[in-house]
Image: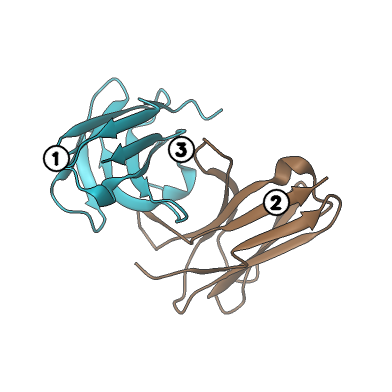
Amino acid sequence: GQQLNQSPQSMFIQEGEDVSMNCTSSSIFNTWLWYKQDPGEGPVLLIALYKAGELTSNGRLTAQFGITRKDSFLNISASIPSDVGIYFCAYSGAGSYQLTFGKGTKLSVIP
Amino acid sequence: ETGVTQSPTHLIKTRGQQVTLRCSSQSGHNTVSWYQQALGQGPQFIFQYYREEENGRGNFPPRFSGLQFPNYSSELNVNALELDDSALYLCASSTGTDSTEQYFGPGTRLTVT
């Protein structure tokens, strides 16, 4: 599968700050997915994006499917301690049954 | 809480041994996918089972095999364990082959020494 480049690899922020992370690829995708993984747990789907330019929110989380279809962004507003975890982007190819994940962005929130 | 359970939680095996990992899907979910997550990496797709038959496989050798049973349980078997097989193994269940609707279990941490 195609490689996804996630950045940053890790970030430390103060509670209450906004967070932004992104995912890029050299290939065009039909679906972008954002997952969060807490320690000792499996990934949990946060947001799914299905078309270029789409902007979708889930509470304090907002994600966008880039116009070029080669990138996606995830923003978290007013971070809280429970936002700590690893955030993964993933793509699903057309008609595909498998997910391909990036390497993740590890988020730490300082109270 | 996704309703997907995995056992055991942790496992230590020796190189060359065989291992069986188990997953119990949500009731009604007829598709299960298995992923390998190495330390510091994202999950990598191993294979998917749909209605008890393999429906697709990632870049993993044949010594990785699986079974799916009618009672929504499934197994991942790995033969001739290698040190690089040390990882978190995740199963994910869904109601069909639409990969965006996958619900992950907590995983089994396998250590090969």
Along the horizontal axis of the image, is A14 left or right of B45?
Answer: right
- Mark 2–mark 3 Cα distance, whole angstroms, equals 23 Å
- Mark 1–mark 3 Cα distance, whole angstroms, equals 24 Å
Give percent across and percent down for residue A87. 59, 53
Of B9 and B50, nearer the camera is B9
Q: Residue at x 23, y 25 (%)?
A: B69
Q: Earlier in the sequence, mark 1 or mark 3?
A: 1
Of A72 and A7, nearer the camera is A7
Judging by colour alone, the chain drawn in brown in this rendered image is: A
- Mark 1–mark 2 Cα distance, whole angstroms, equals 38 Å
In the picture of the structure, the residue carrying the numbered disc 1 is: B79
Q: Residues within 10 Å of mark 3 (few under 14, many from 20)?
A: many
Q: Residue at x 52, y 36 (%)?
A: A41
In the picture of the structure, the residue carrying the numbered disc 2 is: A108
Q: Disc 2: which chain? A: A
**Quadrant (top left/top right/bottom left/bottom right) for the N terminus of chain B:** top right
Give percent across and percent down for residue A11. 69, 60
Image quarter of residue B19: top left
Q: Residues within 10 Å of mark 1 (few under 14, many from 20)?
A: some
Q: Secondary structure at mark 1?
A: loop
In the rendered picture of this protein, how many numbered marks are placed on residues?
3
Q: Residue at x 80, y 44 (%)?
A: A80
Residue A55 makes an appearance in the image: no
Q: Nearer the viewer, mark 2 or mark 3?
A: 2
Outermost residue on the front side: it is: B113
Q: Amino acid at mark 3?
A: Phe
Residue B8 makes an appearance in the image: yes
